[in-house]
Each structure stands twice: as C-alpha cells, then as structure tokens.
Amino acid sequence: ALQEMGKLDSTLYFYNEALKIYKQKDKKQYQSQLLNNISNIYERLGDYEGAIELHDQVAAIALELKDSTTYLQVMGNHA
C-alpha cells in the first residue's frame, strides 16, 4: 500500500507541475484533463472533498469550452 501511495504522490507532483505550465499557456483543455486526473487520484487517496472541488473546476472549464461531453462525465461523477 505504501509503494502505491508513493507512486500516487509522484504522479500528483508531475500532474501539478504540468498544470502550472498549462495555466501559464492558457491551455484550458489540457488543464481540464489534468484536473480530472488529479481528482481521480484524490478519490483513491480518500480525499473526496478535494476531488469534488477539482471536478467543479473541470465542469467550469468544460462549460467555458462548450465541451458538453466532459461536463456530463464530470457531473455524472457527482452522482
């Protein structure tokens, strides 16, 4: 279990580093994908509040981009 947790921590680190770059470059679609991936890790780690907050950010970006598929997927995760 600790080994997997270490892998998740490393994954979170690199996702967050990539997210910083995509925010600087204003690449909303990539931000959305990374936020969704990070929220999935939060769920696996038991941080459900953090996961929901990130899902909300993904939903907001999806609405901004008029990406109904992503929006519906994220809202389905709330159910």
Image (spheres, rainbow, N blue to C red):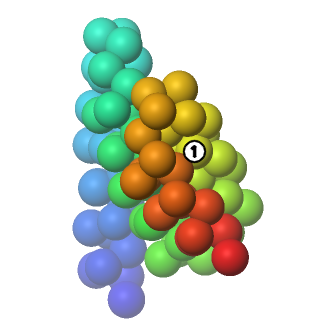
Name the residue at 46% across, 47% down: 68
Q: Nearer the viewer, residue 77 or 12?
A: 77
Q: Is residue 56 above or below residue 75?
A: above
Question: What residue occupies the far bottom of the structure in this picture?
Answer: 1
Which residue type does callout 1 highlight? Ala
The location of residue 48, given as percent across then percent down, is 67, 69
The location of residue 37, given as percent across then percent down, is 37, 56
Q: Secondary structure at mark 1?
A: helix
Q: Quadrant of the C terminus?
A: bottom right
Name the residue at 29% across, 55% down: 10
Residue for badge 1? 59
Q: Which quarter of the picture shows residue 27?
A: top left
The location of residue 61, given as percent across then percent down, is 51, 33
Question: Is residue 15 left or right of 70 when viewed as pictured?
Answer: left
Name the residue at 34% across, 66% down: 8
The location of residue 64, given as percent across then percent down, is 53, 26
Q: Quadrant of the N terminus?
A: bottom left
Question: Is residue 73 left or right of 21 when viewed as pictured?
Answer: right
How many numbered circles are shown?
1
> In this rendering, does residue 51 appear at all?
no
Q: Nearer the viewer, residue 63 or 55?
A: 63
Q: Nearer the viewer, residue 15 or 62?
A: 62
> In this rendering, does residue 24 appear at all?
yes
